Image (spheres, rainbow, N blue to C red):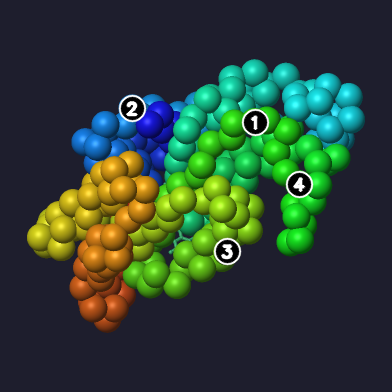
Amino acid sequence: MQIVAFNSSPRDNETSKTELILQKFLAGARRAGASTETIYLRRYQIKDCLGCFSCWLKDLGRCVQKDDMAELLFQHYLKAEVAVLATPIYYMTMNARMKAFIDRTLPLMDPLAEVGPEGGHPYRYEKVPKVAALSVCAFWDQSMFQPLSLNMKMIFGRDLIAEIYRHSSEALTVPELRPQVDQVLAAVAQAGEELVRDGQIKEETMAALTQELAPASIMQEMSRQYWAQAMELAGNK
Ligand SMILES: Cc1cc2nc3c(=O)[nH]c(=O)nc-3n(C[C@H](O)[C@H](O)[C@H](O)COP(=O)(O)O)c2cc1C
């Protein structure tokens, strides 16, 4: 299985928690025999979709714009058997870079093909990737991912084969939480392995992956202390 991951975090790979979870997931997928590649969207120029429908009306299936999305990333997306769309949560959903990337996949759709009962245009390309959505958020409640999950389900329908969502992302590097974090990271890798090997992720793996690191009241206090300390370091008291 050929997996291409698209990471839309603007942060460097040492800081990004999307990257931390993504690379564990891909390591597990490789254990089951998949080949993997990661593309960092921050390194590429992805202009906003112009809404001109040129890809439906003139140059069918191709974008009129000249940038990295039209000339490089679209081809990378098409060649994947599974595309992992990895985004941090910004204001309850995918960040703007991931949204721009998805908007620019409009050339995939064929407006003349028969529309299904729920609406949405079928693909003009014979082979399009299955999609695994992956995300992280700083707050400690899995409900934070509801809007993203709904979005992903509605955009990709049956092509969405997995959703890997990890809350409390900024606490994943706190030394005191190491034992729980190790369990979470092992479960993320396990999820990657199961998806490639079995085509689905076990319920117990998802439970381990989404487990709380500490009770909400402790997470709340840790967050407050973290920001107070960070402000002090930044010269604000
Ligand atoms: C503009 C912005 C909006 C954010 N919105 C949310 C949010 O709605 N809920 C949440 O739990 N975390 C939110 N976060 C925190 C990020 O999801 C969190 O820091 C995450 O680890 C970032 O991923 P990254 O480290 O891969 O960049 C936000 C961060 C930023 C910068």
Q: Quadrant of residue 209?
A: bottom left
Q: Earlier in the sequence, mark 4 or mark 2?
A: 2
In the rendered structure, the answer to whether residue 206 lies left or right of residue 150 reads left
What is the number of the mark on residue 126? 1
Classify residue 25 as left or right of residue 144. left
- Asked whether mark 1 lies closer than 8 Å to ligand 1, one says no
Distance between mark 4 and mark 2 Cα atoms:
30 Å
Mark nearest the camera among 2 and 1 is: 1
* Residue type, numbered disc 3: Leu
Whichever of callouts 2 and 1 sits on the residue coming sooner in the sequence is 2
Tell me the crowding category of disc 3: few under 14, some 14 to 19, or many 20 or more residues within 10 angstroms, Cα based.
few
Query: What is the x, y in percent for residue 68?
Result: 62, 22
| Image disc number at residue 121 | 4
Query: Is there any visible trace of residue 231 in the rendered image?
Result: no
Residue drawn 78% across the image and 37% down it = 110
For disc 2, the marked residue is 35
The residue mark sitting in front, 1 or 4, is: 1
Q: Which residue is mark 3?
A: 150
Residue 154 horizontal/vertical position (percent): 63, 58
Q: Is residue 188 left or right of residue 10?
A: left
Query: At numbered mark 2, what does the secondary structure look like: helix, strand or loop?
Result: strand
Q: First in sequence, mark 1 or 4: give its number.
A: 4
Circle 2: is it few (<14), some (14-19), or many (20+) Cα within 10 Å? some
Q: In the image as oriented, which residue stretches furthest toward the right?
A: 57
Q: Position of residue 115 (x, y in %)?
A: 79, 51
The reply to whether the C-beta atoms of the residues labelled 4 and 2 are less than 8 Å apart is: no
Q: Residue at x 74, y 61 (%)?
A: 118
Could you tell me which residue is drawn at 47 percent across and 33 percent down? 81
Q: Earlier in the sequence, mark 3 or mark 1?
A: 1
Query: Pointer 4: residues within 10 angstroms few (<14), some, or many (20+)?
Result: some
